[in-house]
Amino acid sequence: MHDLPYLVRLGNRLNQGLQGFSSVRRDTHAQFLLQFQQSDGGFRGRDGDSDLYYTSFAIRALWMLDRLTPDIGASVSEYLKGLWSPDLNTLDQMNWLSTSLALEVAGGSSPIANVEELQTLIPQRIEATRTGDGGYSKTTEGATGSTYQSFLVLLTYQLLGLKLPRPNALIQFLYDRQREDGGFVEIAPMRRSGTNPTAAAAAILQELNVLDRETRNDIEAFLKDVKCQDEAGFTANTRIPFADSLSTFTAVLTTQNLQLRPAYRRDDVIQWLTSQLEFPTGGFRAATWDNQADVEYTFYGLGLLALLDAGNDANPKEPDTTGKSDSSSPTQK
């Protein structure tokens, strides 16, 4: 088992991957992210009010960029203090904990006042969502488990410094979600595997130290199938014809973590990201069909560049800050 939680190790890894970014490039993306911060300290999505989900992405992206300042951390910490409740759902609990820990790791003030209390309250809420198949559902009323929710649960237990109860039941649940194409599905009735459920299942199995060579080979074959034919990235499943940055991020991360033979070409993915998805005024969009950047996909865009060590290239591509490019759309090459 690892000493540090998965998300902390990933955060440190992404931060290191962008060490070669210039101050100008860091500031450009940081300023874009800060446009979404609200008066209560939280961050919003493309519209609406502050949301814990987007706040988590914003803080992790700013941490990646070395732009998580004490002032930003203090305002977000106050926002988190006002949100805490033992009744938060699993996703919100994980985001609350991971954002709090990110603030602490970055040298700021954490809203966590009593770790022991959280170690009691949160598992009680989580275990109420455990299903008979060994997985975890989104709510206490769920009849069957979700691969994604189960991944969130593992992350939450790690953030609390606790062991996952009945790990063998979760392992069996995951293998029941594997399909003939080598990948994994989100819920039991599904027959076509998805890139993101496969990445979640792979991460759980690896964190529990039970990922065997046969399963690695299956996942490697599946990732080849979801590599987009027309673009450098990966698709969410084999029926979708276009690549997106979320699926590409999870596919690349899984390939690296499992030490698989890559189905992608590093330089092609970097070119696709920087010429098609990155905006010269900061931020990344989800895919070529998308028309605007947001906090979540800026995290995935930066995260991909970090995983591919693009920030440490001898001559990394820099956004055009001269005003000569069309600032409303990604640079086209």
Image (cartoon, rainbow, N blue to C red):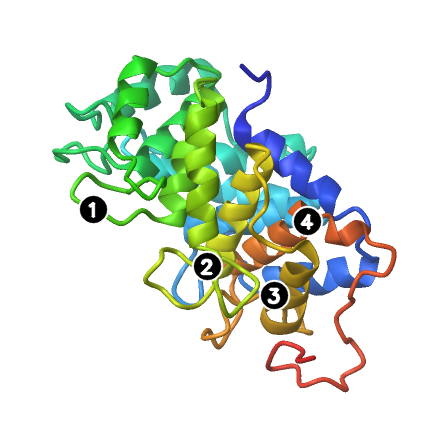
Task: Indicate the amino acid at tag 4.
Answer: Leu
Q: Quadrant of residue 91?
A: top left
Q: Quadrant of residue 11?
A: top right
Q: Which residue is mark 3?
A: 283
Does dot 3 land on a helix, a strand or a loop? loop
Q: Which residue is mark 4?
A: 308
At a point 21% along the width and 25% down the height, the residue shown is 130
Q: Which residue is mark 2?
A: 44
- Asked if 252 appears above or below 207 in the picture, the reply is below
- Distance of label 3 from label 1 (alpha carbons): 34 Å
Q: Which mark is residue 190?
A: 1
- Closer to the chain start, of discs 1 and 4, is 1
At a point 43% along the width and 56% down the height, the residue shown is 50
Does dot 1 land on a helix, a strand or a loop? loop
Lateral position of residue 132 relative to residue 87, left or right: left
Residue 141's x, y, as percent? 12, 34
Q: Residues within 10 Å of mark 2 (few under 14, many from 20)?
A: many
- Closer to the chain start, of discs 2 and 3, is 2
- Closer to the chain start, of discs 4 and 2, is 2
- Closer to the chain start, of discs 2 and 1, is 2
At a point 59% along the width and 41% down the height, the residue shown is 261
Evaluate if marks 2 and 1 touch, with contact meaning CB atoms under 8 Å apart. no
At a point 26% along the width and 34% down the height, the residue shown is 177
- Relative depth, front residue between 95 and 215: 215
Task: Indicate the amino acid at tag 3.
Answer: Gly
Residue 256's x, y, as percent? 60, 38
Q: Residue furthest right?
A: 314
Task: Indicate the amino acid at tag 1.
Answer: Met
- Distance of label 4 from label 2 (alpha carbons): 28 Å
